Image (tube, rainbow, N blue to C red):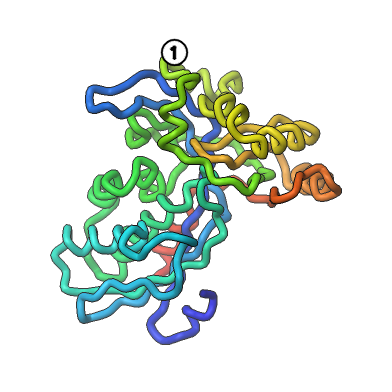
Amino acid sequence: MSGFPAAAGWSAWPAPAKLNLFLHITGRRPDGYHALQTAFRLLDWGDTVYLRPRTDGVIARVGTGAAGVAEADDLLVRAANLLQKESKTHLGVDIGIEKRIPMGGGFGGGSSDAATVLVALDRLWVLGLGEERLATLGVALGADVPVFVRGRNAWAEGVGERLTPLDLPPAWYVLASPGVHAATASLFQAPDLTRDAAPVTIAGFLSGTVLDNAFEPVLRRQEPAVEALFVALSRIGTPRLTGSGSGCFVEFADRGSAEAALAALAAGLLSSGASAWLARGAERSPLLDAVEQHR
């Protein structure tokens, strides 16, 4: 996909990954959805979305997209269709992607890709819908989409759509994937999932005492590969699960410490099928920078 921007009309847009620095389920809402509390941390690493506007109204995916995802179900395509319908534009777009974020890892890849399509096409189609309308549209695509539209680290409640901007200290992360896809729906239905955690405050989280993820004990029991990854990562720091996926991370205050830890993992601590890499915590989304720089 990296050849797209070199061709006439293509532009490249970042779709950053995220981490859930903690995740609690505090109850169930009247609509049946679970009520959550979490803290989103954006990263300077992720997918790249390629867009080429069309004048004939056609929205088409170029390339295979995410592995195993049909074009009609692809969040990239769904986001473009939703924006086209909302804005009543007669324009279309060709869409390509360079995937780096593993599917089912809890790093927010699909949601971030969708948000990037909304934000970038708002600029490319010259719609001017703005952040609020785009974030509202994003909820229809996924609860995590609004945080990527807004592009700032955030405290989240509700199903994850009620956001409060959050200032977080600089940090580097060793990210790791066990190579298995966690099915979110089945995790929410697990009988041993804690669904009534006591609500916490932003101040309580910022004190460093709130680090747990409600899905971690469930997933570690269900998936031997996730348990093996936690064991390996525990030798370099304190591993945590992100979101409701199988991906894990360990936080470090500086790049040097993170690089040393990653080198230790590469020396044979990871089991077969697992992978690990580095990413820096972002103060704000690189997508916002790309929009400001686009002319």
The percent position of residue 120, horizontal first and vertical second, equals: 35, 64
Residue at 55%, 36% (x, y): give it: 168
The residue that label 1 is drawn on is 198
Q: Is residue 71 left or right of residue 64?
A: left
Q: Quadrant of residue 128?
A: bottom left
Q: Which of 241 and 222 is in front in this view?
A: 222
**Of residues 207 and 91, the one drawn nearer to the viewer in this rendering:** 91
> What x and y, as percent, mark residue 204?
52, 18
Residue 90 position within the rendered picture, expressed as x and y whole percent measured from the top left: 16, 73
Amino acid type assigned to the residue bearing label 1 in the image = Ala
Looking at the image, which residue is at 47% across and 40% down? 183
Please indicate, yes or no, whether residue 295 appears anywhere in the rendered image: no
User: Where does the C terminus fall, quadrant-wise?
Assistant: bottom left
Determine whether 114 is above or below 54 in the image: above
Vertical side of 294 occupied by 3: above or below:
below
In the visual, does 189 lie left or right of 223?
left
- Which of the pair 63/237 is nearer the observer? 63
Residue shown at 46%/67% (left/top)?
97
